[in-house]
Amino acid sequence: MLIKNDFEVAQPIDKVWTFFDDIPAVAACLPGAELTEDLGDDKYRGKVAIRMGPVKLQFAGNVAITERDNAGKRIVVDAAGADEKGRGQAAMLVTAKLLSIAGGTKIHVEQDLQLSGAAAQYGRGMISDVSSVLMRDFADNMQKRITARDTGAAVDTSTAAPAGGFAIGVRAAWMALCRVARRFFMPYQPTPS
């Protein structure tokens, strides 16, 4: 399943791209993500924990930076892992492209996600909504870390808090409700013949 998200960071593109060089700091911005080992050559071992409804999934696996285009400000990350309780597997190819905009940087993210097991039971809409919530949190965390570095404030070097089920679930449900409401209240527009 292909999921696309865009978010903005109020920092210049070169500063954001430099931040992307610090993969442990980037990973720490994603709720529930933790790098556990640097394997060298842009390869890492890590974990991701997320709760979707009543199911808490904890994936452990490997992450590799497969492409890094400094001139085009584009990075490709390949990640794959299995749930630690054997309830499924996940593989994701993430492509992030940075674009300079007035007032900061726009980051376009495409996630090609393959799920099996417990996580696969959720519909595309719910998974997309949860992904959107996580990307917003990621953007907020990234902004805070870059600002802290700029101001010389102590940078929180811990990993991001686990992706909590209730808060993310409520925000994802709200997004789904808004999507349904837009369809319901959009005026009928006949297709041209």
Image (cartoon, rainbow, N blue to C red):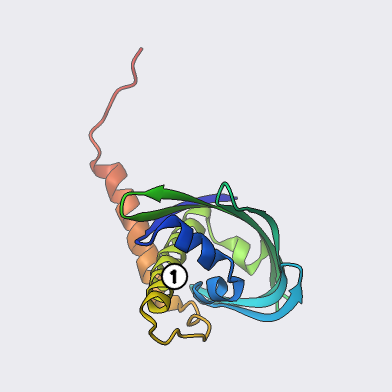
Vertical comparison of 185 with 7: above or below = above
Quarter of the image where the C terminus is located: top left
Along the viewing direction, whichever of 36 and 115 lies nearer the viewer: 36
Q: Where is residue 71 in the image (x, y as percent from the top left)?
A: 58, 48
Q: Which amino acid does label 1 sit on?
A: Met
Question: Can residue 72 be seen?
Answer: yes
Q: Where is residue 111 in the image (x, y as percent from the top left)?
A: 58, 54
**Image-based side of 66 in relation to 168, left or right:** right
Vertical comparison of 7 with 149: above or below = above
Residue occupying the point 44% across, 60% down: 132
| Crowding near the residue tagged with mark 1, few <14, some 14–19, many ≥20 C-alpha atoms within 10 Å | many
Numbered disc 1: secondary structure: helix
Q: Where is residue 186 in the image (x, y as percent from the top left)?
A: 25, 38
* Residue that numbered label 1 is attached to: 142
The image quarter containing residue 7 is: bottom left
Along the viewing direction, whichever of 102 and 95 lies nearer the viewer: 102
Residue occupying the point 45% across, 48% down: 99
